[in-house]
DNA sequence: AATGAATGAGGTTTCATTCAT
DNA sequence: CATGAATGAAACCTCATTCAT
């Protein structure tokens, strides 16, 4: 009934609690991704995490708090890791974009991250903080990265104009299409995303190289 | 059997019923777009349509049937109209794509249709028929249209390769980005979609024209 | 809008109205028998009668009024017809009971009347007037009939005691069992009701004849 | 997994849950008996059981599952207990039947079990499993019991024929009549069921004893 | 008189959240 | 902390009844 020993006990208990919290977040991630926010049932998260329903409320105030923590703690890190990818890349812009594409191909398409993008698209209208968070954590950083690559390309004379600096979305476009396509239309007409991305970059490089053609 | 003369009478009643059905569909469209499928409450649709809760069930079997009818009857038509746009266009491929972009700019971006796209992305995983429908009504047709334009461009010597025929998604990419961007990130960094699309087409034309560059 | 010719028209209209009322009652009978009172939907009655739902309310105040009218107008007559069966029968009591059994076998078991009995058993607790009506129209008369037969048998020396007069239910018992059995347990073990009734009457005659055995 | 010591605690909670489940079943029994399946409102069951509406759904999947459990868990046992009554009775067949009648008089007529019979008659057409269950649990066993008694009577020379073995329904008949009578017609003409059953058995014994009379 | 679209009270069921153990 | 039974607001859907045509 009263408190028990606090020395190692407390530490062990804390560790166990943290582990539990982590399990819940992982379970929540997969369920939210699969079902969307509204359709996700706390029961389902709990059973997938292997804990009782009430346990979730020990760690998170309510469903939205769980969702928030999920986005911040689970998704944030995977983003940050990607942001440092090409910080110090040496080589032609074409190779850099190719390397970037191959990394994204491996790290985004076909992984849970692609589903996170879909989740954000779905839920952002209802959770303004979600769009804001995704903006700051992913989009803003990604855009800065692309702009840096573009500036580097211009400086090296590989790019003829500032188009890519003005519209870094050009790089995001084929990725977004690939993600959506795989998620919705793969069964009707498969898309070879690797070939697509490569063709896209080729086209892009030619289109951006000879600005005055 | 046993029907009595109901010339104008029946017609008027039928007309009123159809009008009500239309009002429900319109209300449903806006609520589904704003809230998503699961979060949409039939109550809310009813009150927005100015009818009683039960009235919806006079016209639609259940929530999913309402959603289906909505997609098929409200969204189908707007698609068909767009498909005939450039069927008989004369001029350079560049002008053709430009005209297409401007039409889409006017008819897609900034209209409810953009939100419909977001709705489809959100709900398709839960409603396989939705992806199928959207595929057949929009994507397949759009792709055929782009491929026709691409073939025409190759025939006229304006395009150097079959890249666009192999990946018509190239055209869809900036549209998708624009739609998502406006919906999620406009408040953080506005996107001049018109300039974006034009720059994109320019880049694309150059990139596709000099395949061997 | 206003009234039309009332001469033959009125008569014809009335006739048509009565026919419609009859159709509704017939439809209601079959649906109430099949579904029970609560589970019966006015829609179902209407469609089975080939009229609109509202039409029922032209002829009957509400669902219970329909049920009442049904019981009184459809079921009453079929009962009355049976009551006069054996009023003036000549022959031995055994033959009389045998004839009665055969009539009931033909006119009760396997007909809608058996289902009516089940309906009464089911609904009587909720509609006291139903038990009362069935009592007066069927049970009281049937009991009087049996008592008359019993008295005749005693007078002719064929029955040794007044047991059957005190408990006319003895006659009803195998009928009730047959009806329930056929309705519920026929699939598990069929009952040859004719043989059963005959054996029953044989047993009964022997049992009642030699009261002092 | 990850369970902690919950000796008495868990046991107490479980016990309380079981008690609640039992209360719900008891409440459901009385409401179903009084109202019938369709007319029974879950609200009513809940308030009668002294629990919240949702609590029912903690223990039973839906209304039909509640009904099923009710039949299987509440009614099954009372049947089994009755089946062993006369397994090892010594004495004349007449006394055996008399004892049986007196037991049934006490344990069936005038108790809730009589109403259960009415419920089965009412709902079996809509729930085929109900007829099946009642058949296996009650009717089949009862018939076997009666046939055993009949065979014993024949072996002891107390019964002259196999009529009772061929038609054990003969025994059920007066019980069924008594149950229905008490439920529907008692107010109009009371039935002394005890006297009725005794007269019936007397008649039966005489009728079956002197088969060749 | 007949119609059938419209109504809304009321029914079943769900599920986020609470709380005693 | 962890549990999971209990809760009750709220969602979907039904259907007897009304009423304008």
Image: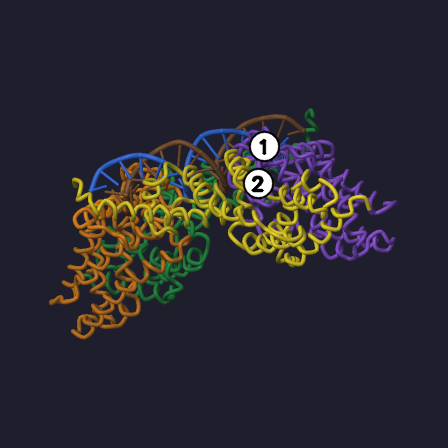
Chain colours: A green, B orange, C yellow, D purple, E brown, F blue
Q: Which residue is mark 1?
A: D188
For this view, does A194 lie left or right of residue C179?
A: left
- Image point 22% across, 52% down: which residue? B108
The quadrant of the picture occupied by the N terminus of chain D is top right
For this view, does F21 lie left or right of residue C196?
A: left
- Image point 17% across, 56% down: which residue? B103
Q: Chain of mark 2?
A: C
- Image point 73% across, 43% down: which residue? D200
Percent position of residue B63, x then y: 37, 47
Q: Which residue is most to the left?
A: B90
Q: What kind of element bears circle 1?
A: loop
Q: Which residue is mark 2?
A: C139
Percent position of residue A30, x then y: 49, 49
Same chain letter for marks 1 and 2: no
Label 1 – label 2 distance at C-alpha: 10 Å
Mark 1 touches mark 2? (CB < 8 Å): yes
- Image point 68% across, 33% down: which residue? A9
Q: Which residue is most to the top?
A: A2
Q: Residues within 10 Å of mark 1 (few under 14, many from 20)?
A: few
């Amino acid at each position: 009934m009263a408190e028990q020993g606090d020395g190692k006990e407390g530490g062990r208990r804390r560790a166990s609690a943290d582990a539990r919290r982590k399990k819940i977040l992982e379970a929540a991630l997969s369920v939210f991704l699969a079902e969307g926010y509204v359709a996700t049932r706390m029961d389902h998260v709990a059973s997938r995490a292997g804990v009782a329903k009430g346990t979730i409320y020990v760690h998170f105030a309510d469903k939205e708090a769980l969702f928030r923590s999920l986005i911040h703690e689970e998704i944030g890190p995977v983003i940050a890791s990607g942001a440092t990818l090409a910080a110090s890349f040496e080589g032609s812009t074409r190779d850099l974009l190719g390397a970037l594409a191959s990394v994204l191909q491996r790290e985004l398409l076909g992984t849970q991250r692609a589903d996170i993008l879909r989740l954000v698209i779905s839920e952002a209208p209802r959770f303004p903080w979600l769009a804001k968070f995704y903006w700051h954590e992913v989009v803003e950083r990604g855009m800065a990265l692309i702009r840096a690559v573009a500036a580097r390309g211009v400086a090296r004379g590989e790019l003829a104009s500032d188009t890519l600096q003005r519209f870094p979305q050009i790089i995001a476009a084929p990725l977004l299409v690939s993600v959506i396509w795989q998620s919705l239309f793969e069964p009707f007409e498969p898309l070879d995303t690797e070939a697509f991305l490569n063709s896209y970059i080729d086209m892009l490089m030619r289109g951006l190289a000879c600005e005055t053609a």
